[in-house]
Image: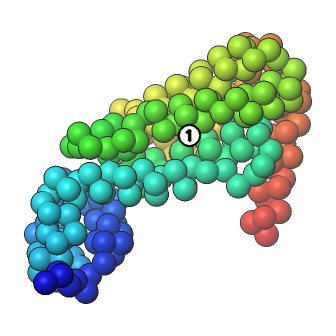
């Protein structure tokens, strides 16, 4: 006889992710999750068999959630890269438990996010080519510029989330922006063009908020 459940897998994973973001990964287990949902442990066992199955599914679900947050809305490569950076900062400030889980691998051997999720942004050859063209720098220098910016941003946010340094969100974004400009200058990019683009993005953001 087929097993019937009234609690869907999506509901379970949505609730598990909500708990992870709110309370941290260590707070998520079959008993606490079933209590949060308001059901017995049976639906969770039916869908995932055991805690190991739930952990694997939650890791995939959390990575997918973060990828959507990091996906830029702009089709412009330069604006898109800036959007990724801002979204990365926002995750660290708005969802530090998720940041720890994904990028510091806190308490999980199943999470597939880690730092590779951010580095994947620079593996897009089309993105690299467009940014190289925009700033008039060679492809290899563009790759250095993107890598250095991402590594700096990651290190800064790890320090913030771990409590090593204390700055607010706007200061963090300004630090990332300043480092980005410094690395661009180091790569031989057109810094004045970058500044004009940044001013344009700020004005666009202000108009969108109004």
Residue shown at the point (37%, 52%) measured from the top left:
60
Image-based side of 195 in relation to 84, left or right: right
Rendered view: 52 above or below 122: below
Q: Position of residue 148 (x, y in %)?
A: 59, 21
Image-based side of 115 in relation to 195, left or right: left
Front residue of 154/47: it is 47
**Which quadrant, please, contains the N terminus?**
bottom left
Image-based side of 76 in relation to 67, left or right: right
**Which quadrant, please, contains the C terminus?**
bottom right
Residue shown at the point (69%, 39%) measured from the top left:
81
Q: Position of residue 85 (x, y in %)?
A: 61, 41
Residue shown at the point (23%, 79%) measured from the top left:
37
Q: How many marks?
A: 1
Question: How busy is the neighbourhood of tag 1: few (under 14 within 10 Å), some, or many (20 plus)?
Answer: many
Q: Position of residue 27 (x, y in %)?
A: 18, 59
Rendered view: 8 above or below 161: below
Can you see residue 106?
no
> For the residue labelled by badge 1, is the local secondary structure a helix, a strand or a loop?
helix
Image-based side of 66 in relation to 180, left or right: left
Residue shown at the point (12%, 77%) measured from the top left:
42
Rendered view: 109 above or below 125: below
Q: Position of residue 141 (x, y in %)?
A: 72, 14
Q: Quadrant of residue 35?
A: bottom left
Question: Where does label 1 land, which residue?
Answer: 172
Q: Quadrant of residue 68?
A: bottom right
Can you see residue 51?
yes
Front residue of 161/79: it is 79
Q: Quadrant of residue 164?
A: top left
């Amino acid at each position: 006889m087929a097993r019937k459940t009234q609690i869907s897998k999506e509901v379970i994973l949505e609730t598990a992710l909500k708990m992870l973001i709110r309370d941290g990964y260590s707070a998520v287990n079959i008993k606490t999750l079933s209590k949060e949902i308001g059901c017995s442990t049976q639906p969770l066992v039916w869908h995932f068999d055991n805690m190991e199955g739930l952990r694997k599914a939650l890791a995939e679900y959390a990575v997918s959630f973060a990828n959507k947050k990091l996906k830029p809305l702009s089709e412009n490569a330069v604006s898109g890269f800036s959007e990724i950076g801002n979204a990365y900062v926002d995750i660290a400030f708005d969802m530090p438990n998720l940041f720890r889980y994904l990028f510091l691998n806190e308490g999980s051997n199943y999470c597939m996010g880690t730092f590779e999720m951010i580095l994947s942004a620079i593996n897009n050859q089309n993105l690299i080519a467009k940014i190289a063209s925009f700033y008039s720098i060679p492809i290899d220098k563009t790759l250095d510029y993107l890598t250095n910016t991402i590594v700096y941003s990651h290190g800064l946010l790890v320090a913030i989330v771990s409590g090593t340094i204390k700055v607010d969100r706007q200061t963090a974004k300004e630090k990332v922006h300043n480092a980005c400009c410094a690395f661009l200058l180091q790569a031989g990019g057109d810094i004045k063009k970058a500044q004009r683009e940044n001013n344009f993005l700020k004005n666009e953001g202000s108009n969108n908020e109004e």
